[in-house]
Amino acid sequence: MESNQRIKAAFAEFERRILPAKMKNTTTNGKKFAVWFEENGIVIQDATADDLYRACVKLKSVIDWAVAPRKGSNDGFQQSSTPGQLKSHTDPEDLTVSGTSVRNAAKKIDHEKAKIVLRDCKHLCESHSTHPHSKANRERAALLERFNLLVANSPAPITLKQAEAIRVEVSNLQKSFE
């Protein structure tokens, strides 16, 4: 029982060391580690976090990953003097600039750009004109109706990509009137 707890503790430490990478919990991965331990003369019950780490470095190209290791470092894993204290760079707490998260700031800028595109698109609808006055009024009403429907059906806040798609659809409808 004590051996089982020691293995679990070693594995937990090993998992912290390889963050943000994460292996899939499969029997195939377990068998690959078991073979490596046997080939290197390590008894599985006596394996330490260092042993698991060395095996992982050697087997990383054949292991099934839930989150693959990062490229760029020598062994593919981020290491520091305190392996368990690593944080993912995608952690929202790490992405703050003067109290506002970078992700929220990017969404806000994206939404501001989308509002400009939507404003231009609405102006395009309202200023649409063709030679006969009554036909232009019907077409303008159809363009505004389609624009309003597309905006209403888009999730809030509307992103720049969604606004561009709305503009393209309204522009295509306007071209079909010509």
Image (cartoon, rainbow, N blue to C red):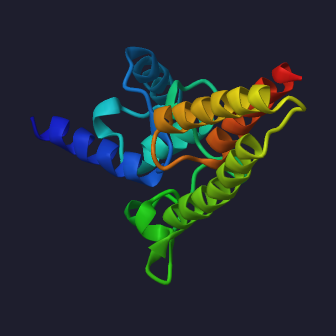
Instruction: From the viewer's perspective, tell me whether residue 82 is left or right of residue 129.
Output: left
Which residue lies at the image location 34% right of the left edge and 31% below the top edge?
A: 44
Indicate the position of residue 38 as horizontal and vertical percent values: 46, 24
Image quadrant in which the N terminus is located: top left
Q: As displayed, is residue 67 above or below residue 123?
A: above
Furthest residue to the bottom? 98
Indicate the position of residue 177 as horizontal and vertical percent values: 83, 22
Q: Is residue 73 visible?
A: no
Indicate the position of residue 166 as horizontal and vertical percent values: 67, 35
Which residue lies at the image location 67% right of the left edge and 54% below the top edge?
A: 119
Q: Is residue 150 visible?
A: yes
Pick whichever, 135 or 103, lies toward us: 135
Q: How many marks?
A: 0
Furthest residue to the left? 1
Instruction: From the viewer's perspective, tell me whether residue 55 is left or right of residue 167.
Output: left
Q: Quadrant of residue 45?
A: top left
Indicate the position of residue 16 as horizontal and vertical percent values: 39, 52
Instruction: From the viewer's perspective, tell me whether residue 56 is left or right of residue 109.
Output: left
Which residue lies at the image location 50% right of the left edge and 43% below the top edge?
A: 21
Q: As displayed, is residue 33 above or below residue 162?
A: above
Which residue lies at the image location 52% right of the left edge and 24% below the top edge?
A: 64
Image quadrant in which the C terminus is located: top right
Pick whichever, 14 or 125, lies toward us: 125
